[in-house]
Amino acid sequence: MSVGVRITSVLLVLVTALVQVSIVWRFDVGGAAPDLLILVVASIALLTGSVSGAAHGFLAGVALATFAALPLGSHALVGTLVGYTIGRVGEALVTDEHPVPPLVAGVFATFVMQMGRPLVEFLVNPALGRVGGVWSQAALVTLISSVLAVPTYVLVRRILVAANEFAPVVTRDGGEASA
Amino acid sequence: MRPTLPRPIRRRRPADSSRFAKGSRSVAAPTGGPVAPTAEYVGRRGRRVAGGARSSSGNVFPRRRPSAPVRRSAFAALIFASIALISATYRGGVVLHGAQLAVLDVVAPIERGMSRAWDPIAGAWNWSGRLLHATDENPRLKQDNEELRAALRLAQKDADEAVTLRREMNFDARYVFPDGYEHNKVHARVIVQATGAAQGTLTIDRGSDDGIRVDDTVMVTSGLIGRITEVTPSNAVVGLITDPQQQVGVKVSGSEASGVLQTTSTEGSPAMHIDGVKQSAKVEKGDIVVTGGFRPNGRLKSIYPEGVLVGEVTSFANPPAELEQTVQVKPYADFDRIDRVLVLVPDSRGGDAG
């Protein structure tokens, strides 16, 4: 993975976290808001692998908590788990052009984040953790994510492909590799 | 026989038909399907790009699997970092919180700007969502409203009844009942209040089984309303004093004035006057009128016990040419709203008081 892709993916996560906090959370879809950030993390993890996915998941969790003034750590922990898991699946896939993997990855990532974060907060501090209505909320957000998963993946992929072209990896023989 | 090995999933794709790579600028290279690693093409800005847009694995970014120790170490480090963040946050880490606030200070203007820019769109979206929700919610809210109104009416009725019962209890304790009527009082509920042609009667839910007999005096907490005219084991009919057929011997408390209470009109609040008050009797406005305990046609004992509140004098006229005064009386009882009554049963009869 080239430096351009690395920088772009990090910027993509940070910008998406800002957009999530400033814009997406303000859109009420049947009492819930889409989780665009975790879809971006899932897309990056699917495209770049487990270590990168875990790192981006961690970064996304820290960024979201910081931008929204939320308790640090719980988003990052679940994001790391989600990014790593999807990255492992991505490493095993031969092609990334089929729409099913991003769809499944997006649904999985959203559901795990929606269920995992309240669970972590509840385990850390039962007095502050909110578990009531988590099931219904998670189901609704996951449903919304299933619609957005593939478009998000396509967009992320295009951005990263473009970034890869701007800063390709230089090969030993003086040529440039695309990745 | 050769052992079968799991094959990687490969889909046949027509040349240059990659949906995902279509927007890529590096697609100037031969695309579609795996490209040999040795292939070369001139990419954007004239660069020589080895490997084309896609790797031999068929993916845009080749998945070079990191070694297991590297992968596990990185994963463990990130998990550890997350747990450390959680721990520090919930233990009130000042430095961490300060750093978080510092970053927030930097990004807050950006967040505010983005938020404001999207305000109209988000507002319109949420408004339309609420509108749809309101349309669905409206019938349910109407039904809820009806149910609540019904519950409120029941509660109001119960509250009124509680007030009435409390008043009756207080009344029983405070009111000085006529001699011989202190003990046997029957509380009854009005079940029929006749209006129109039959105006002047009430039907109550107590009867002879409760010790009630014809001619027993019936009152409300504010004063006399009539007497029992008919009785069955479980019900009784009350003839009201507003009925012109009814005649009640009354007297003005603290005065020698006495006479027969007559109803002048039953339109609206009943207008009553006392017939037969002597010119010499001294009457004042506001004097209290009570039952006299005598019959109008003589000095025989009345069916009404002496001293039951009836009303008060509202006006009086003393024309010189007449032998009698004209005394107007306003009854204490509100004949338009009688829900519960009190039947005075003589102590001498015994029976069960309600």
Image: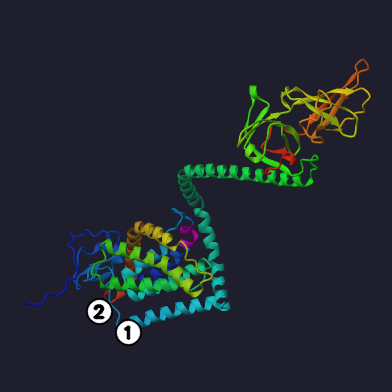
Q: Nearer the viewer, residue A103 or A131?
A: A131
Boundaries of the magenta span: A19-25
Q: Going by the picture, which residue comes out furthest to the left? A: B1
Instruction: Place residue B328 in its image quadrant.
Output: top right
Amino acid of disc 2:
Asp
Query: Considering depth in this image, is A138 or B165 the residue closer to the camera?
Result: B165
- Image quadrant where residue B211 sits: top right
Name the chain letter of the residue that bears numbered label 1: B
Q: Is residue B218 magenta?
A: no
Horizontal side of residue A168 vs B12, given as left or right: right
Confirm whether residue B206 shows in the render. Answer: no
Q: Residue at x 49, y 54 (%)?
A: B118
Callout 2: chain = A
- SS under mark 1: helix
Q: Is residue A17 above or below residue A3?
A: above
Q: Is residue A128 left or right of residue B308?
A: left
Q: Which disc, if any, is residue A173?
A: 2
